[in-house]
Image: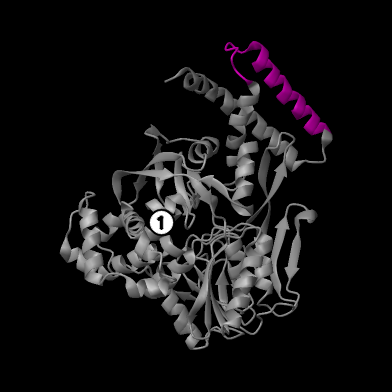
Amino acid sequence: MNSQDRKQSSWTPLAMSIALVVGILIGVFMGNPFKSRSWIEGDRKLNSILNLISEEYVDDTVNVNNLIEMALPEILAKLDPHCVYLNADELTAANEDLNGSFSGIGIEFQSINDTIRVVDVIPGGPSDKVGLLAGDRIVTVNDSSFIGADVMKVRSKLRGPKGSTVKVGIKRSTGGKVYNFTITRGAIPVNSVVASYIIEKGTGYVKVNQFGANTYREFLTALTALKADGAKRYIIDLRGNGGGYMERAVMMANEFLPANQLIVKTVGRYKRDEDAVYSDGNGSFQDAEVVVLIDEFSASASEIFAGALQDNDRGLIVGCRSFGKGLVQRQFELPDKSAVRLTIARYYTPSGRCIQKPYDTYADDLYDRVSHGELYSRDSIKVDRSQIFSTSTGRKVYGGGGIVPDIFVARDTTGFTSYYRAVVAAGLMQQFSFSYVDNNRSALNAVKDYKQLLRNMPANERLLNDFVEFASKRDVPARWYYINLSRDNILTGLKALIARDLFGQSAYYPIVNRNDKTIEAALRALNHHKAAFPITDD
C-alpha cells in the first residue's frame, strides 16, 4: 500500500463520521428548510467538528476539504439510489453524456455493493467494439483491483485522451473467469436516435437510445422522414434506454396524443414541485398506430413515454416489464462547480400509478427476475395487486414496479448454447467483425449500404468456418454440435456487426431485427390493428 493509499485508509473512519454528522444536518435542513434557527445551530455544530479535526486530530496531513468530498457521496447514497454528488469534473462529464460528446470508453455504469456494473454500452463506442456488455462487472483497471472504487475514481480511470488505451478486467454472470479487454479511448457519440428505417411496408421503426438534449428533434426528424417514405404506423424501440431528460419524453408523447390528455404528473413534498402536463393537440402523428418496445433496462423517461401512451390507450406496449424508476431528480449546482442531484418528486402516469420499485431490490433485481422465470413467462411477472389502476378504456395496469407490457414476449433462448455464450462472453463476435472489416477494407470501400454488403459477403458456410477458426485461436474450441444449433444467431450477429462497423448503428438494426422475437410480435400486433386507438382488451 503506498503512502497515499495509507492516508486515504486512515481517513475512512473520519469520512464516515463526517458523513453521519452531515447526513443528520442535511436531514434537518431538508426537513425544515424554513427553520433558520435549527439550520444555524446545525451549521455551527458542523463547523465546530471540522475545526476540531483540522486543529486537534493527531494526523496533521488530513485535508478537511478532501474529507468532505469523500463523505458527501456516502451521505446521498443513504437517501435513495438516484441521489448523487458530482464534483466539478464529474458534473462536466455527466452533462457531456446528454449534451454532446466526450472522450472515453463508452459505457454507462453504476456502483452496486462496491462493484462497478456496466448499465449500458454506448452503441458504436470503443467498449461496444471490443465486446463489453450491459451487466458486466469491472473488477480491474490496468491490472489493479477496482472493487470498491467510487464514482470519481471510475470516471478518472476510464475517461482520458482520445487514442489512449485502458485495460479492464470483466466478470460476467456466466462464470467466475475474468475477461481482459484493452480499449482504445475515443470520441463517444451521443446520438439519441441510433436507427430509423422502413421495417415493413407502411411501418417505420425508430430506435431511441436515450433522452438527451437533442432527442426530441432527432425523433421528430426520423418520424417525418419515415412518413415521407410511406410509414403510417410506427415501432418505437426503447429497450435498453435508461432515460434522461423527462421533458423530452413528454414532448415525444405529445406527438401522438389528442388534445387535453394527461401525459405525466409529478408530486413532491412542496407545492412548487407539483405539476401536471397535458397534450396540446398539435402532435403530427395522432392518427398513427404505435407500438412501444420495452425491456428490463427501460427506465425513467422511457417509462414516462410508455406509461403515457399505455394509460391513454394510445400505444401498445410490447416486451418485458420495465426497470421501475418513478423518481424525479433536480440538479443543484454548488459554488465550487460541483452539484447534487436530489430526488425532489415522484412522477405518476395518467392512470395515477407510480411505477417506482422498492429501493432494497436494486442490487438483485435482475437476478431475481431471471431466477423467478419472469423473463420467460408472463405468469411469473411480479405485480403489486394492491396497486391496480385503470386506463381510459378500463384496462388494468399496475403500479409499484415498472411498466407491465400489454403483450409479453419471452426471452428468446433459441440457439443460446454453451458455445454461443462463450464467444459472446469473450467478445469474439465484435472482435471478428472488426478484424474482418479491417482486413477487407479496400474491397469494402466500394460497398454503398448494408443491403449491398449482404449480397457481397461470403457464403454462410465460409463465414461461419472463418469465425470458428478465429474463436479456436482465442481459447474457444470448436464444438460443431453446439455451433450448428447456434448457427443463425452467430451468422446474424456477425453480419449485423460487420455492417455496423462499416456504416454505423443505422445498418446494424435492420439486420439484427430480422431474428428478433419482440419485433415479430410488434409487427403481428400492427398487422392485426391491435394498436388502433383506442386500445381495448378485446
Residue 248 lies in the magenta stretch: no
Count of all numbered marks drawn on residues in the image: 1
Residue 47 lies in the magenta stretch: yes
**Color encoding of the figure:** one colour
Magenta range: 37-63
Residue at x 58% of width, y 66% of height: 387
Residue 352 shows up from this direction: no
48 up-or-down from 269: above or below? above
Residue 464 shows up from this direction: yes
Q: Secondary structure beneath disc 1? A: helix
Query: Horizontal and vertical percent for residue 165?
Result: 43, 40
Query: Horizontal and vertical percent for residue 266?
Result: 71, 60
What residue would you read off at disc 1?
368
For the stretch drawn in magenta, what is the main secondary structure? Answer: helix
175 up-or-down from 287: above or below? above
Q: Residues within 10 Å of mark 1 (few under 14, many from 20)?
A: few
Query: Horizontal and vertical percent for residue 395?
Result: 57, 79
Horizontal side of residue 479 vs 9, given as left or right: left
Residue at x 58% of width, y 35% of height: 74
Query: Horizontal and vertical percent for residue 113?
Result: 46, 41
Quadrant of residue 471 within the rendered picture:
bottom left
